[in-house]
Image (cartoon, helix red, strand yellow):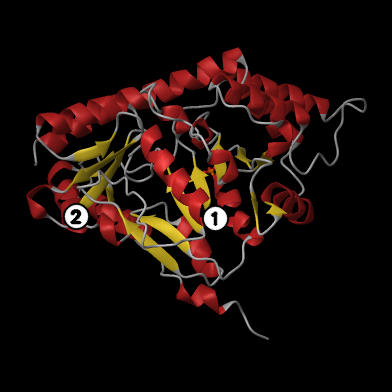
Amino acid sequence: MKINSNYLNLEDSYLFFNIAKKVEEFAAANPDKTIYRLGIGDVTLPLAPAVVEALERASAEMGEAAAFKGYGDYEGYGFLRRSICGYYAKKGVAVGGDEVFVSDGAKSDLGNILDIFSEDNAVLIPDPVYPVYVDTNIMAGRGVIYIEGNEENGFLPMPDSSVRPDIIYLCSPNNPTGGVYSGEQLKVWVDYANAYGAVILFDSAYEAFVRDGGLPTSIYEVDGARTCAIEFCSLSKTAGFTGTRCGYTVIPRELSRAGQSLNRLWLRRQSTKFNGVSYIIQRGAEAVFTEAGLSQSKRNVDYYMQNAMIMAEALEKKGVWFTGGRNSPYIWLKCPGGMSSWQFFDHLLNEANVVGTPGAGFGRAGEGFFRLTAFGDRANIETAMQRFAGVI
Ligand code: PLP
């Protein structure tokens, strides 16, 4: 027998392993020192009370003969899809219930969506980037064309007309750079995709962190997106669901390629390989979109964004170049003094006892940059940034 030898082409990811090892060694050598962690990519605040209440209620229903639920709809219960459509409507975006597919999170859908595309497709991926886009394509044997984010373009690369991709990944607000595309910039991408028959896979996992009302939080706010874009959303960061697991993907009815509706192909894929998200979790997710759920979840997001503001102000004061932090929980900074990503990691750990994430771990174009995250405790972040400012 043969294995999928494409897996052998994956680069081993030592990023978080190496970080953990260095931190562990430092802690062992310096047992008296407090370590400040600004590398956390996971939420730290608990679920909103409205969500917990809904989860409890739904759990109780599962023990009652009259309310018990077995298999649900492949694409998610109608009650949740209607709530998601209502959430879009508040943004002024019309999305139909049959265009929404509920899943256990954006990561699964971002990987699984490739099932409906041919392996021959050319894929365009920004660098630096959330590593899942690259690895899932390598697993399928697809070659990847990188488009470089850099200081000049503010880590928001724009299309290059000499390249003709079939699949384009965009992540806005971006992990790791915190960059957010404007409506005008997204319009250029949408026109490019429509002109060449490409499909944009738009990762909107951090849409809830956008504070500037002029910036889009969905690609469907842009004219023409319904004929070229699939949007991936997650409750992980929006509502603290990283451990609870629920997300949703939108595929407009108008989106077809090679004469086939991508919405229908995805439904076919999901109904064959996926049996849905648990009823209990979907009831919890529904509660996120209630008035109480939205305001309670927003309070948590506001807390993280206040952290981000404290971090951004500290960097501004020191004249450090950075992106993100204003509309994103991520801050992407240029390593001071021309240090490499790992040199700066060591410097920060040894001199300030602060931990972040070396940018080189997110792609070649990330070398010389560094990611900080705002998903932490306020007092901890304030102290960490004072210590940070003292060593740069
Ligand atoms: N997309 C991006 C850009 C992310 O950073 C993450 C998680 O960190 C995800 C998707 C995964 O989201 P989920 O928890 O819904 O799988």
Q: What is the crowding at mark 2: few (fewer than 14 residues within 10 Å), some, or many (at least 20)?
A: many
Q: Secondary structure at mark 2?
A: loop
Q: Give left or right: position of 207 versus 158.
A: right
Q: Quadrant of residue 229?
A: top right
The C terminus, quarter of image: top left
Residue 99 is at least partly visible in this image: yes
Q: Residue at x 27, y 53 (%)?
A: 359
Q: Give the x, y percent position of residue 276.
A: 74, 44
Query: From this viewpoint, which residue is outermost toward the right?
Result: 66
Report the residue marked by disc 1. Answer: 197
Does any portion of residue 181 appear in the rendered image?
Answer: no
- Residue 74 image label: none
Q: How many marks?
A: 2
**Amino acid type at mark 2:** Gly
In percent of width and height, residue 264 lies at 74, 49
Residue at image x 46%, y 30%? 217
Q: In the picture, which quadrant includes the N terminus?
A: bottom right
Please provide percent x and percent y for residue 242: 53, 39
Q: Earlier in the sequence, mark 1 or mark 2?
A: 1
Q: Residue furthest bottom?
A: 1
Question: Residue type at mark 1?
Answer: Gly
Residue at x-position 64% and y-position 46%: 255
Q: Residue at x 39, y 62 (%)?
A: 163
Give how far across and how far down residue 90 sits, in percent.
56, 19
Tell whether circle 2 marks a residue whose Cβ is less than 8 angstroms from ligand 1. no
Q: Mark 2 = which residue?
A: 368
Q: Is residue 256 left or right of residue 375?
A: right
Q: In the figure, is residue 338 to the left or right of 117?
A: left
